[in-house]
Image: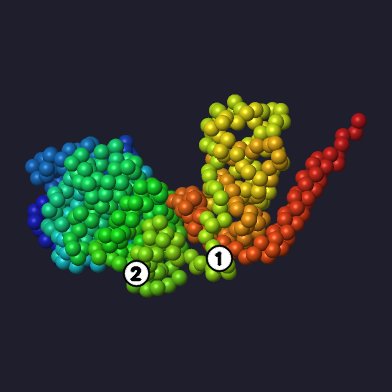
């Protein structure tokens, strides 16, 4: 396949790959030149530079050197939407376009239109998939003479790359934002006559339109109420999996829609936020139904800071049909660190692709039964951390009488009930836990509303932070006649003392093996948290009580020593301030 010019049907003797190899080094120079001209004229539109490069290419390709002729050509050749897009962004720079066309070659300008880095602002970052992620997706999909689609095609990054890889394939894209769709259409039309880009929601694609390979990088976390499709299209999704309607974010709507347009033997790659892989509640039910249908082939956890508009880590879902096992790959450390953004190098990409068919410390093939045992969590870290064999191991839940999250009290309400005078009621916050020890200076409360009574801590309970970065915990000592109310950032775990010694348990959870066990159940995209159900499934040792007491006594003695040393340190620090006194 050679490069086509859709305006005149002229064929250039270069493939897209050859064009890229020949001219990519000039794109930055030309982009810089064009951007400087725009600044001189005060034209700061989002797509001004891109449109100027495109119109310069049109001018040179068609040998137009007169401004009026160039305007007339654009008006007569392109659709009304394309004409409006160009006029709105090029402003009064038509003459600059002609000047630029006289400075560079056709190939150099074409390369600039195709590979101009439009991630210069946060909005465009939302419309462009990072090139290294695009390359990885293409390597996974292995496109060859296929019907290929990009749902939420943005500015065409994936489609341009896919055309470069397999020019003989047929290509389709859909993008809901007009200007973004125009960028995508311009780029792809210049290099292929086998592509169609439509401006519409991905949920409004015709039901009978099916594809062999699909890529989708949708807007993560978009709310259903933001109207991501027609009511009829949404209802069709809800009819398939009713729980989708009960979830605020629309991620699963996009994911299910991809499967609805994937051919029987097709394959899809979807970029998702990590929350999709582990969120609880109705999300768990959705994942269960989706997984049981055999739709998930692999999950690849990617490094953080790959995208311009967010630093959070993300994952790729590889979807197909009739999967009885799921490949879990942890690629979070396979990254080349950049100044503004991280990237996946060619070596990183090759390693990830190889792991799709290889068991390794970063890759495992997991049965659906094992996924079911883990609440259908699709986060690779859950399955790839080496679990230490625990002697006399039992599930944590077998020694728990009750577990609850602390009271979630508004700051304004808390301000009203805090007492300046000592009372028999106090309030425990996360900040009061330091080095496994609870501060002696807990704030006093005037009263505790009856609705908060259930959040008061019983003597000997384990208090552990909901936040797992890092995990904080302590054993609560509550004197008779006193009440201590736990904050909502804490879990309060009442233990069965006939089975387990609290200090033995704390000693284990703070050990290397215990910390590793907690990290395996931690979930979160930007901030790791410990889910209640995950905590219950942590394996802990449960020897006889006499053996527990030996370890608990050693632990408590050392903890008391630390308390004494902290007291001495605080006292010595205070005395330092008074060593020097002014002469009277």
- The quadrant where residue 391 appears: bottom right
Residue 188 percent coordinates (x, y): 19, 54
**Residue 154 visible somewhere in the drawing:** no
Crowdedness near tag 1: few (<14), some (14–19) or many (≥20) residues, C-alpha within 10 Å: few
Residue 517 percent coordinates (x, y): 53, 61
Crowdedness near tag 2: few (<14), some (14–19) or many (≥20) residues, C-alpha within 10 Å: some
**Residue 333 visible somewhere in the drawing:** yes
Measured along the vertical axis of the image, is residue 209 above or below residue 325? above
Query: What colour scheme was applied to this rendering of the protein?
Result: rainbow
Q: Which mark is residue 393?
A: 1
- The quadrant where residue 268 appears: bottom left
Residue 313 percent coordinates (x, y): 42, 54
Which residue is at a point 34% across and 51% down the rendered structure image? Answer: 285
Residue furthest top in the image: 416
Residue 132 percent coordinates (x, y): 34, 60
Which residue is at a point 64% across and 38% down the rendered structure image? Answer: 484
| 475 lies left or right of 226 | right
Measured along the vertical axis of the image, is residue 410 above or below residue 386? above
């Amino acid at each position: 396949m050679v490069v086509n010019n859709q305006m005149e049907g002229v064929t250039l003797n270069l493939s897209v790959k050859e064009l890229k190899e020949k001219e990519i080094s000039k794109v930055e120079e030309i982009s810089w030149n064009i951007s400087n001209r725009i600044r001189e004229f005060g034209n700061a539109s989002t797509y001004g530079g891109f449109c100027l490069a495109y119109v310069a290419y049109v001018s040179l390709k068609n040998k137009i050197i007169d401004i009026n002729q160039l305007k007339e050509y654009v008006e007569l050749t392109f659709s009304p939407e394309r004409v409006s897009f160009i006029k709105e962004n090029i402003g009064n720079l038509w003459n600059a376009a002609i000047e630029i066309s006289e400075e560079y070659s056709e190939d150099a300008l074409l390369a600039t239109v195709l590979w101009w880095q439009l991630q210069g602002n946060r909005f465009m970052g939302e419309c462009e998939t990072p090139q290294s992620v695009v390359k990885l997706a293409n390597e996974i999909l292995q496109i060859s003479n296929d019907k290929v689609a990009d749902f939420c095609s943005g500015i065409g990054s994936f489609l341009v790359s896919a055309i470069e890889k397999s020019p003989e394939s047929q290509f389709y894209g859909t993008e809901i934002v007009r200007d973004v769709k125009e960028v995508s259409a311009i780029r792809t039309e210049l290099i292929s006559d086998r592509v169609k880009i439509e401006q519409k929601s991905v949920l409004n694609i015709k039901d009978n339109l099916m594809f062999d390979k699909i890529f989708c990088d949708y807007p993560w976390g978009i709310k259903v109420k933001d109207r991501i499709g027609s009511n009829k299209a949404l209802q069709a999704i809800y009819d398939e999996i009713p729980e989708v309607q009960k979830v605020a974010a629309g991620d699963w709507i996009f994911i299910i829609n991809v499967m609805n347009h994937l051919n029987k033997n097709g394959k899809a790659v979807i970029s998702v936020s990590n929350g999709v892989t582990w969120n609880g509640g109705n999300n768990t039910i959705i994942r269960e139904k989706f997984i049981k249908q055999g739709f998930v082939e692999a999950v690849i956890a990617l490094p953080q800071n790959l995208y311009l508009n967010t630093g959070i880590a993300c994952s790729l879902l590889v979807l197909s049909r009739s999967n009885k096992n799921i490949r879990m790959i942890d690629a979070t450390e396979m990254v080349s660190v950049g100044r503004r953004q991280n990237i996946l190098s060619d070596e990183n990409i090759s390693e990830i692709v190889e792991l799709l068919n290889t068991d390794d410390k970063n890759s495992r093939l997991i049965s659906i039964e094992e996924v079911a045992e883990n609440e259908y969590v699709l986060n690779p870290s859950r399955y790839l951390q080496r679990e230490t064999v625990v002697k006399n191991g039992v599930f944590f839940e077998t020694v728990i009488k009750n577990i609850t999250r602390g009271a979630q009290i508004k700051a304004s309400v808390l301000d009203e009930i805090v007492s300046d005078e000592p009372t028999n009621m106090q309030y425990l916050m996360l900040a009061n836990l330091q080095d496994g020890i609870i501060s002696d200076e807990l704030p006093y409360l005037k009263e505790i509303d009856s609705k908060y009574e259930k959040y008061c801590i019983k003597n000997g309970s384990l208090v552990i932070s909901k936040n797992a970065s890092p995990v904080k915990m302590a054993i609560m000592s509550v004197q008779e006649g006193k009440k201590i109310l736990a904050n909502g950032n804490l879990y309060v775990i009442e233990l069965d003392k006939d089975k387990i010694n609290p200090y033995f348990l704390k000693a284990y959870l703070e050990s290397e093996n215990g910390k590793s066990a907690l990290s395996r159940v931690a979930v979160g995209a930007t901030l790791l948290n410990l889910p209640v159900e995950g905590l219950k499934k942590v394996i802990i040792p449960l020897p006889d009580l006499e053996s527990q007491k030996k370890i608990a006594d050693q632990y408590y003695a050392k903890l008391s020593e630390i308390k004494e040393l902290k007291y001495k340190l605080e006292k010595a620090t205070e005395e330092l301030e008074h060593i020097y006194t002014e002469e009277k």
